[in-house]
Image (tube, grey):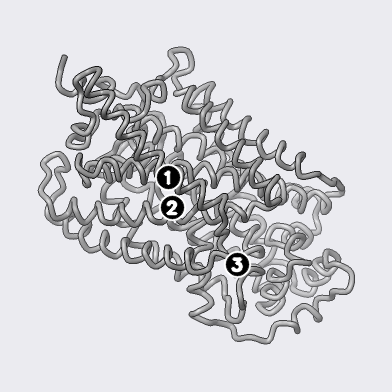
């Protein structure tokens, strides 16, 4: 038996290179959830202690600036270590065998956080569905149980497609992302091209009784820009958009071609930055900053009025309104489609390192997919959707779980600095890239530390509750425990020290 085969579950992953450049870019765009962010921003604005100066265009640009160190770190490391599991492999090999317990605690917490986010997305997709259907002439009223059931069904369909074949899952995700982007582009064009008076008249028909455009607009009297308010918004972008660059790296061993491997992260980042910022600007251009800020921060209005519903009524065209409405929901489905692909790769990488049972690295000969890992994801996500719905009846109850992902990214920044300063032969990073990783890894650590502070300092805004925090703390502890137990069992039963895996780059 070779050393490599003794360390890892087998000599190769069994996964194939099936993702092209657009697939790799799409999975990162879906990961960054800009359509969901445009729909959900009102719930956050309403929770802020003040919306004075909450300029979303500037907030998007500043949040993107904060994310640049991570873009550079991930774009650099994916070139040198393109492996399934992406940043888990970078983190584990940088921290090494002595801190493998910490790596596994953090990555398991990250996985459960990701599943919590998909539960959030699946549940909130039903809220968006209920917002757009009345505009299309379909009036429905769903109970909490029905909302939970629809959310679970959405994710179940996505998982089943992925079980039937990875290529089907990737193509579904790519198609959903393409439809979503086209719908977003159409909505932006409508808001920029339609006369303001016409849009105001159309939107007025959506306002609840007792509200008028002028009354809502005049209720905001604050400044156009406030840095303190914008900095308070950074966790919102951390929940939905800019830090979520890990999807391409997580499937790196399945990406075809150097261009797709090297450019998927920066391309997805630029796509998301442009479209998200344009979406916010389109609302301000068509309805004015004062009205948008006041309306989105009003609990009586923001469940009805968001970027998508504004564009739908502004279009004055039934077919276009249907397309925009459908694409607003396909954004959520695209996120779920990416999630079904990516989280399984982390399970796969953990099982490949012998930390988790080998069943998680099992690839079905019939379908060519890790069917048991997919099924496990569905069960966990369904339970989280039910918990958020039944206990809190709102998807924002799951926001707080994202703090664990931010902490995970913070430690990945530390890993980048370690890779830059220690000459591990297995990394094979040249001197220029070492300088880049050292500088931007340190900056990434600082950014994520600040966002972590924002999350923890304002739990009432960012879903700091026993469900979100409890799930994540339990996940980290369980991840550490599983690693220690797995190491003990492997040593006693097979004479294999699984910590050795963290000294080697896994095979493709």
The residue tagged 1 is 109
- Residue 404 marker: 2
The residue sitting at 49% across, 67% down in the picture is 234
**Residue 500 falls in image quadrant:** top left
Q: CA distance from mark 2 to mark 1?
A: 7 Å
Q: Is residue 434 left or right of residue 264?
A: left
Q: Nearer the viewer, residue 94 or 132?
A: 94
Q: Which mark is residue 283?
A: none
**Mark 2 closeness class: few <14, some 14–19, many ≥20 residues within 10 Å:** many
**Mark in front: 2 vs 3:** 2
Q: Is residue 322 visible?
A: yes
Q: Secondary structure at mark 3?
A: helix
Q: Residue at x 31, y 54 (%)?
A: 411
Q: Can you tell which quarter of the image residue 223 is in? A: bottom right
Locate residue 496, reporting x and y percent: 20, 23
Q: Closer to us: mark 1 or mark 3? A: 1
Q: CA distance from mark 2 to mark 3?
A: 28 Å
At 64% from the left and 43% from the top, the residue drawn is 387
The reply to whether discs 1 and 3 touch (Cβ–Cβ < 8 Å) is no
Structural distance between the alpha carbons of marks 1 and 3: 32 Å
Quadrant including the N terminus: top left
Q: Position of residue 218 (x, y in %)?
A: 75, 84
Label 2 vs 1, first from the N-terminus: 1
Which corner quadrant of the image does residue 215 belong to?
bottom right
Q: Position of residue 352 (x, y in %)?
A: 31, 27
Q: Earlier in the sequence, mark 2 or mark 3?
A: 3
Which residue in the protein does label 3 denote?
280
């Amino acid at each position: 038996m070779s050393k490599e085969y003794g360390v890892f579950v087998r000599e190769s992953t069994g996964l194939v290179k099936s993702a092209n450049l657009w697939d790799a870019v799409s999975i990162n765009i879906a990961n960054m959830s800009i359509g969901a962010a445009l729909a959900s921003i009102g719930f956050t604005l309403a929770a802020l202690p003040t919306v004075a100066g909450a300029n979303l265009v500037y907030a998007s640009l500043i949040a993107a600036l904060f994310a640049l160190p991570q873009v550079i770190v991930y774009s650099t490391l994916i070139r040198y270590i393109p492996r399934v599991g992406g940043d888990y492999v970078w983190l584990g090999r940088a921290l090494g065998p002595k801190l493998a317990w910490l790596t596994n605690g953090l990555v398991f917490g990250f996985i459960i956080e990701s599943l919590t986010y998909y539960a959030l997305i699946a549940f909130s997709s039903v809220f968006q569905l209920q917002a757009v259907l009345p505009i299309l002439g379909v009036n429905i009223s769903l109970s909490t149980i029905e909302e939970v059931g629809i959310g679970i069904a959405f994710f179940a369909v996505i998982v089943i497609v992925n079980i039937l074949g990875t290529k089907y899952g990737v193509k579904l995700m790519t198609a959903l992302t393409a439809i979503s982007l086209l719908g977003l582009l159409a909505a932006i064009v409508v808001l920029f091209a339609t006369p303001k008076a016409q849009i105001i008249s159309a939107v007025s028909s959506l306002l609840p009784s007792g509200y008028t455009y002028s009354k809502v607009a005049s209720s905001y009297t604050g400044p156009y820009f406030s840095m303190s308010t914008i900095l308070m918004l950074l966790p919102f972008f951390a929940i939905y958009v800019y830090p979520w660059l890990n999807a391409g790296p997580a499937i790196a061993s399945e990406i075809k071609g150097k261009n797709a491997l090297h450019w998927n992260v920066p391309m997805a980042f630029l796509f998301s930055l442009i479209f998200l910022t344009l979406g916010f600007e389109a609302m301000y251009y068509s309805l004015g900053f004062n009205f948008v800020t006041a309306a989105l921060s009003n609990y009586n209005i923001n469940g009805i009025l968001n970027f998508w519903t504004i564009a739908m009524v502004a279009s004055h065209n039934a077919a276009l309104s249907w397309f925009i409405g459908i694409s607003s929901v396909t954004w959520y489905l695209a996120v779920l489609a990416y999630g079904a692909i990516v989280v399984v790769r982390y399970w796969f990488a953990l099982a490949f390192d012998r930390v988790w049972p080998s069943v998680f690295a099992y690839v079905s000969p019939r379908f060519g997919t890790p069917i048991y890992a997919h099924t496990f994801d569905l069960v966990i996500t369904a339970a989280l959707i039910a918990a958020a719905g039944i206990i809190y009846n709102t998807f924002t109850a799951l926001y707080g779980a994202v703090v664990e992902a931010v902490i995970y990214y913070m430690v990945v920044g530390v890993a980048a600095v370690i890779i830059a300063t220690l000459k591990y032969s297995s990394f094979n990073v040249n001197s220029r890239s070492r300088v880049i990783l050292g500088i931007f890894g340190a900056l990434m650590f600082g950014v994520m530390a600040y966002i972590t502070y924002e999350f923890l300092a304002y739990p009432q805004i960012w879903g700091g509750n026993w469900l979100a925090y409890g799930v994540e703390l339990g996940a980290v502890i369980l991840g550490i425990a599983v690693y220690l137990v797995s190491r003990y069992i492997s040593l006693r039963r097979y004479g294999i020290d699984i910590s050795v895996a963290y000294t080697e780059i896994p095979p493709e």
